[in-house]
Amino acid sequence: MSNLEVGIVGLPNVGKSTLFNAITKAGAEAANFPFCTIEPNVGVVAVPDERLKVLHELYDSKKTTPASVRFVDIAGLVKGASKGEGLGNKFLEHIRQVDAVAHVVRCFEDPNITHVEGGIDPLRDIDIIQTELCLADLEVVEKRIMKVAKLAKSGAKEARVEDEILRRIKEALDEAKPARQVDLSDDDLEVIKDMNLITLKPTLYVTNVAEDEVATAFEENAYVQKVKEFAAQEGAEVVAISAKVESEIAELDEEEAKAFLEDLGETESGLDRLIKAAFDLLGLQTFLTAGPDECRAWTIVKGTTAPKAAGKIHTDFERGFIRAEIVNYDDLVANGSVAAAREKGQVRVEGKDYVMQDGDVVNFRFNV
């Protein structure tokens, strides 16, 4: 996984584009990224991490590189997208390629912004999008069943296994239930991995709220509460954001943004919450490398072993892995240097079986 990709979906006029524009403006400042010139529908933003600032000052590093998330703007889906309505097929194809889905739902009244369905009803909006995505997946699954069923009849064991998995998924999709609600084992998922089913992708709901509700909406906005109840049934996360506020924050420098958020009664931007939720959704964490040349956060899946983590930096590091010298971030900062932490016995030497922990500051030893 080089870079986590989150697809932003939603009906037209729910605030999706406003949010995406805020994301791209926020990302435009991230000059450290080697991929700043990217397609117009992709925005890259840094994963907020205060630890990097502290390490940067500690080592007086020449540069700092945060972990990052790519957001892909998938144009507003409409009823009938699965049948090619609007630019349906093209956008559904875009969603197949992302790692996770952020579903933007409008949870504010504004007579000046028309709603494509005539009024505000977040659960109806979720249902429209979910139905379209289920129909798109259903088409893919039915085609695959026709192909696999012939092989299954001729006695091919693997085909019989796949056929059984596909029929369970089809049953859910027929009822407009996403494939992620089907009880599938890791082995089942491996069998159908290459199908890239949209409704299998982890999903979080982004409730777009009015500017004056930013600090209270998550607990008090009636529409948001409905979305939270719905999301709880499928174990999904909900984030409350004002896309309008985010687009205003994106225009400000760091100090101004901080003051603006304080005025709203907030400690962090909605975009930061969204990035953290997306990271969490995919079971990701970071480890850190630090020195005078660069301080950097590296993205790995939770449960990654030291050699695999080393491979994120360079394949040679994994191939010739000898050991990992690790100090916990808090211990490093408290002691002021690796040498001082080592004197206190707080620098550990870990081997090939070590599972990386969030906040490990690492120096890999390797020999190729």
Image: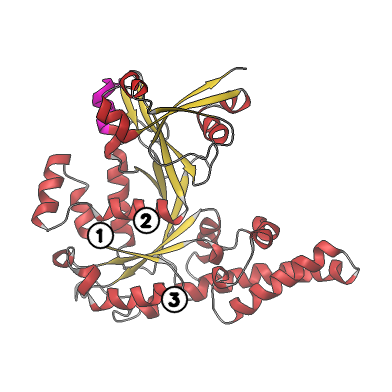
**Which residue was labeled with disc 2?**
277
Quick one: 126 or 160, which is closer to the camera?
A: 160
Which type of secondary structure does the marked residue at label 1 adopt? helix
- Residue at horizontal 39%, vertical 39%? 67
Question: How many C-alpha atoms fall within 10 Å of the one at disc 1: few (<14), some, or many (≥20)?
Answer: many
Q: Between tags 1 and 2, which lies in front? A: 2
Q: Which mark is residue 243?
A: 1
How many residues crowd mark 2 within 10 Å: few (<14), some (14–19), many (20+)? some
Q: Quadrant of residue 200?
A: bottom right
Please name the residue that numbered disc 3 is placed on.
233
- Image-quadrant location for residue 292: top left
Look at label 2 and name its amino acid: Ala
In the image, residue 4 above or below residue 125: above
In front: 187, or 306? 306
Q: Are marks 2 and 3 in contact (CB under 8 Å)?
A: no
Q: Where does residue 309 sit, x and y in percent of width and height? A: 52, 35
Question: Mark 3 or mark 1, which is nearer the start of the sequence?
Answer: 3
- On the rendered structure, is 263 left or right of 287? left
Point out the stretch of residues depicted in magenta. Answer: 53-61
Secondary structure under tag 3 reads helix
Residue 59 position in % (x across, y down)? 28, 21
Residue depicted at 64% across the width and 79% down the height:
171
In three-dimensional space, the C-alpha distance between marks 1 and 3, rounded to whole angstroms, equals: 26 Å
Tell me the CA gap for discs 2 and 3.
18 Å
Instruction: Select label 1 or label 3 by which is in front.
Output: 3
